[in-house]
Amino acid sequence: MASTIKDIARRLNISVSTVSYALNGGPRSVPEEVRDKVLTVARELDYRPNRVARSLITRRSHVLGIIPHRSSRDLILGPFMQHVLNGILNEAELMMQHVLIFTRCDEKDTAGTMDQFLGGHVDGLVFISSDGLEPVLEELRHRNFPHVALSARRGASPTVTVDNVNGVERAMAHLYGLGHRKIGHLRGIPTHYDGWERHEAYSDFMRRHGLPINPSWIVDGRFTPFDGRCAALKILDRPDRPTAVFAANDEMALGLLEAARELGISVPSQLSVVGFDDSPHAALCYPRLTTVRQPLNDIGAAAARMLLDIIEERDPVTSLRFGTELVIRDTTARPTEDQS
Amino acid sequence: MASTIKDIARRLNISVSTVSYALNGGPRSVPEEVRDKVLTVARELDYRPNRVARSLITRRSHVLGIIPHRSSRDLILGPFMQHVLNGILNEAELMMQHVLIFTRCDEKDTAGTMDQFLGGHVDGLVFISSDGLEPVLEELRHRNFPHVALSARRGASPTVTVDNVNGVERAMAHLYGLGHRKIGHLRGIPTHYDGWERHEAYSDFMRRHGLPINPSWIVDGRFTPFDGRCAALKILDRPDRPTAVFAANDEMALGLLEAARELGISVPSQLSVVGFDDSPHAALCYPRLTTVRQPLNDIGAAAARMLLDIIEERDPVTSLRFGTELVIRDTTARPTEDQS
DNA sequence: CTGAAAGCGCTTACAG
DNA sequence: CTGAAAGCGCTTACAG
């Protein structure tokens, strides 16, 4: 059986309060010799403080909760989640917090979900995506429970987002500037806010420039290379295929590149491709991917910091939006004459 | 203020025990009408059970702890961690457990580290790597605290490992079979058990086949593409470069491919490359990477399951080793005549 | 200055 | 069958 402060107190014939104060170095001061004795006995007994008992009183666990996005039955950790999580973890470490990932998060069972979230295991929550979780966010707001959402509509809950509209604008303007007029889109999950916003921005650009939006040039995918490949096959394997495709993220663009290779369509000479994210592999694949960079690590770190600010009732910052940058590499070029 | 079972009990003039039994549906039975009233009031008061209070008594948090490997000051979530974590999360979900990632894990401060681990936040621990944490594992064993280690020497603590020796053997035999005799190695962190074991297996193969081991053909890296590129540059940018290189993981192999491209060395005609992992990008890069596949997701899932088995004192399974498979793609070929 | 006691929100033996 | 009580391991006002 593990030892407790009671055991230490008994051994030294002092009160538990003194032991507690000695162990924590405050707030009440303890004579140095007593403190030393407590520390010695603690070591002898292999004492480890029970943080759960403490957090029952202090109402702080020093753990940040993460709610991953679930694009299907199982949880897929793509580069987006990977790098955002990396940012969260590094920032959490600096702030001396741990990170708990909630696995079960049934959209239909709001009550059960709330039970998990509010059970005291975490001091606050970072939602990787708000997709399907509006009722949960709503209740969290109502209960005033600290939370931050990525990929969510700005306004209601505190958010850390990326400027999708601006990012897509850069990508599309680049393609348009090269001479592309027939531009397709590998769309993300439409209920996913970023996916939705990028598609909106794409459509908006096409309309504004009087370009034809061909429905068969727009196919959905769940942000994976596999989905990207399948979707790309549908778009590219037809006589009236577009001369360029903008993919909602790099993973799908990678799948698109693969599909093009399979169909013998050479990139960028016969097809231009732009992705979104600038995940590390965008620079390692071949041809190297032209893409819209968003600072995934920084977004994660900012979300973690904002969450702790809310938990500790500091600044009233409630939303942050990161800019993007177009990274031109080797998958984009002018369309060839006969294509236009 | 959030409501508690006391509030419910007071409202209905019944005891907290009855409320507790009603809410939990047992173990004591409660008349249906009382149960209904309790549930109604609970809803009215927006009652959420405090799981921390419960876990103080039951000594179960239903949370599995993860200790990531830290290759440098900050935590790097490469594909290895990504897919292992994915396996852990999916399995944890099936087992109704959440997952807590420990951010702070100072190798020098064993006591402080143990405080975190044993604080009651988690029921057990999965170590992504044992690198630098032997003293911690030792104490965990001594205290009989449930834990499982990946990338660790089999024997002391329960482990889930991959058969590195066999995997490397396949990779090397493939290169040797193609006619390669001058084979270099992009080595992982030597204190990392998998990295160490792969290097041992590489050396062993070279020796057994009477091949020359040239120290300048072996360079270390921390498993990242960036390190792979730097290391590869050292190996390749010299007159007596090897005709093939075996990289300790795919990420470094990807960096190697990039370095070769920069140096104008064409793969596979002038240089053969084999990686390890078969992470998704191995099939998406160009040329597609020949590599040793290990079932990362399954390894994570198995570790999670083994941990819960230990926590709940089921089977006495204490170690599991997964096999590998050579996936031949486009980065390996016979060496050209003039190279031999 | 230090000890006895209340209490965090639960679960569960123990009485009645 | 149900309530009063003890207790999980702590923290911290409250007495002395």
Image (cartoon, coloured by chain):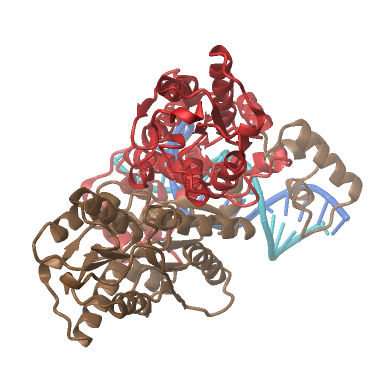
Chain colours: A brown, B red, C blue, D cyan
Query: Which is more toward the observer, A29 or A294?
Result: A294
The quarter of the picture where the C terminus of chain A appears is bottom left
**Residue A31, can we see it?**
yes
- Farthest residue to the front: give it: B338
When the figure is inspected, residue A331 is found, relative to residue D8, above or below; the finding is below
Query: Where does the image place residue A331, in percent across and percent down from the top left?
Result: 34, 63
Query: Which is more toward the observer, A16 or B154?
Result: B154
State which quadrant residue B110 falls in: top right
Query: Where does the image place residue A49, in percent across and percent down from the top left?
Result: 66, 43
Question: In the rendered view, does B256 fall on the left or right side of B33?
Answer: right
Query: Where does the image place residue B184, in percent across and percent down from the top left?
Result: 56, 31
Instruction: Write the residue at 35% across / 71% down.
Output: A152
State which quadrant residue B10 falls in: bottom left
When the figure is inspected, residue B267 is found, relative to residue B195, above or below; the finding is below
User: Count the marks: how many?
Assistant: 0
Question: In the rendered view, does A69 fall on the left or right side of B53?
Answer: left
- Farthest residue to the left: give it: A239
State which quadrant residue B48 falls in: bottom left
Instruction: Write the residue at 61% across / 55% down.
Output: A93
Query: Which is more toward the observer, B119 or A9?
Result: B119
**Residue A106, can we see it?**
no
Query: Where does the image place residue B86, in percent across and percent down from the top left?
Result: 39, 43
The quarter of the picture where the N terminus of chain A appears is top right
Query: Which is more toward the observer, A104 or C14?
Result: A104
Question: In the rendered view, does B330 fall on the left or right side of C10?
Answer: left
Instruction: Write the residue at 17% across / 62% down.
Output: A219
